[in-house]
Image (cartoon, grey):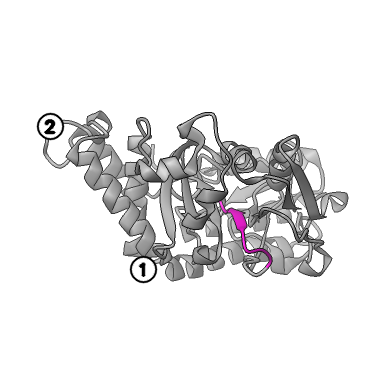
Amino acid sequence: MGRIFNFSAGPAMLPTEVLEATAAAMLDYQGRGFGIAECSHRGKEFEGVLDETIARCRALLGIADTHDVLFMQGGATQMFTLIPMNFQHKSADYLVSGEWSKKAADAAKGLGEPFVVATSETTNFDHCPDRSDWKLCDQADYLHVCTNETVHGHRMVDWPVDASPNLVVDASSEFMSRPHPVNQCAMVYAGAQKNLGPAGVVLVIMRKDMYPKQSKMPSKLWNFAALAENKSMINTPPTLGIYTLLETFRWIEKQGGLRTIETRNTAKAKLIYDAIDGHSGFYSAFVSRPEQRSHMNVNFRLPDEAKTEAFIKQAAAEGMVALKGYRTVGGIRASIYNAMPVEGCRALADFMGEFAKKNG
């Protein structure tokens, strides 16, 4: 069976070239007679992988020497649980704009005094609150934001780098989908399973002056400074996942870098949003403000549940899968991360047009 168009929100599809290169390295890494997942993380083979992965990550994002590139095991939920444990001493600011930023704020409760600077929960998270509505705490240890909300399908077009000297960004679902101002942030983190690689790896970009602000942690495994001192290898890191990140970074470079990726992603998203707007009597977007529409997660509804189920079933029959919306909101969610080709978005847009004509 050939490759299909997988619109999963994560773990998500990876570029075929990345999968093929990783599969080859799994069987025999550089002609050594063993695979990359079989070699010691202390050996020269993986040391070379780690060094190159960090170097390519720095080059793609233009990361300054003021910041470290770290790899942790787990996912974004683990990270937004660890962040207040490390850095929330009295209070911390949280922008609550969707499902994931709300969970991050809830994780900070009991560890200090998380302060919600603004929320759009009363309108079912159909937008990200305007900066003019934010009420920031002057004494906050940091400001936490999620720049792309996968469940509701909206994004922050511009990261709020001027809002706090210690901006912490959950960029999981849009990381490396466009250039990011990481050097103007205290911390940026991303679960790998959207744009970067398989689940189980978190990429962290940490400003070094944050380390002295850390609380004493019960384990080095949860201590960012200790992780940096040990080059992300306090214990055995997720070696295969990191290798896949390396192949992904190589692939992004071959595409022309993050500016080219951004242009492509904009065009991909437009195909599907045009299909929604072109049949506005049949499809309705989750997001109330078109300028905030996510370029990674396109969320929309059909007139009723029966049509929604039929849409999902018929799309799957035509090679387009994982379109069911998140369990708390329903509807349709088309996740179109970097690896989703333009052809996949065009196929979905064409299908949407035909389905609306037949069922409208």
Q: Is residue 354 above or below residue 38?
A: below
Q: Looking at the rendering, in which quadrant would you find the N terminus?
A: top left
Residue farthest right in this picture: 122
**What segment carries the magenta color?**
163-171
Of residue 219 and residue 324, the one placed in the foreground of this image is 219
Which residue shows up at 62% across the image and 65% down it? Answer: 159
Residues packed near mark 2 inside 10 Å, few (<14), some (14 to 19) or many (20 plus): few
Q: Nearer the viewer, residue 98 or 321?
A: 98
Tell me if mark 1 has few (under 14), some (14-19) or many (20+) residues whose alpha carbon lies within 10 angstroms of its own: few
Q: Is residue 358 visible?
A: no
Q: Which residue is mark 2?
A: 33
Secondary structure at badge 1 equals: loop
Query: Where residue 212 appears, x then y in whole percent?
Result: 52, 50
Left or right relative to 77: residue 283: right
Residue 40 point in image, percent of width and height: 23, 31
Residue drawn at x 65%, y 70% as measured from the top left: 162
